[in-house]
Amino acid sequence: MRGAPLFPFAVTAFLGLLLILSLSLVGINIGDDLAGGNENGEGNAEQQEFDDPIELGQSVYEMNCASCHGGNLEGGVGPALDGGNYSQEEILSAIAEGPGSMPAGLASGEEADAVAEFILSVSE
Ligand code: HEC
């Protein structure tokens, strides 16, 4: 007798967990579908593989820099980067050091090189 009411409770809890788990799996799938649809629909540059470092750079820029330097490098919180004002070295050191209120280390290695190349290619 003792402990008997616990059993149905445990079953309910278990079913609840299963429900949560399955819902989150469904959510993940929907997320994938949406992302895929976007890429195909708009045909934009956000591919997963980049043969061209400038495309990689553009994607890194859009994700890590555009919020402050503008979608078209026109500037915002940070200075405009589209005027060819900055050399490759200046861009790389800005990324590494984060001048002023710019956070340091937003990109590194290949991605930092690529984003510098992208900025230079746009500002030429
Ligand atoms: C949170 C906002 C923010 C983000 C994100 C950001 N920046 Fe900046 N950036 C700034 C600000 C603010 C300055 C001006 C800093 C100063 O000199 O006071 C700046 C300055 C710069 C400069 C000029 C440095 C110099 O020598 O004067 C470059 C180049 C630059 N950012 C590149 C980038 C790149 C590339 C990214 C992405 C990897 C990026 N920024 C992301 C805010 C940001």
Image (cartoon, grey):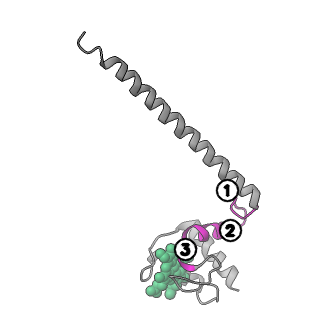
Is residue 39 toward the left or the right of residue 97 in the image? right
**Res 93 seen here:** no
Q: Residue at x 52, y 68 (%)?
A: 107
- Badge 1 vs badge 2, beta-carbon distance below 8 Å: no
Is 96 situated above or below 49?
below
User: Gap in Å between the C-alphas at discs 1 and 2?
Assistant: 12 Å
Q: Residue furthest top?
A: 1
Label 2 neighbourhood size at 10 Å, few (<14), some (14-19), many (20+)? some
Q: Earlier in the sequence, mark 1 or mark 3?
A: 1
Q: Is mark 2 within 8 Å of ligand 1?
A: no
Inspect the magenta stretch and tell me whether residue 120 lies in it. no
Is 68 situated above or below 4?
below
At numbered mark 2, what does the secondary structure look like: helix, strand or loop? Answer: helix
* Circle 1 or circle 2, nearest the eye: 1
Q: Residue at x 60, y 90 (%)?
A: 85
Label 1 neighbourhood size at 10 Å, few (<14), some (14-19), many (20+)? few
The dot on residue 53 is 2
Q: Identify which amino acid the numbered label 2 is placed on.
A: Pro
User: Gap in Å between the C-alphas at discs 1 and 3?
Assistant: 21 Å
Percent position of residue 113, x then y: 59, 72
Q: Is mark 3 within 8 Å of ligand 1?
A: yes
Magenta span = 43-69
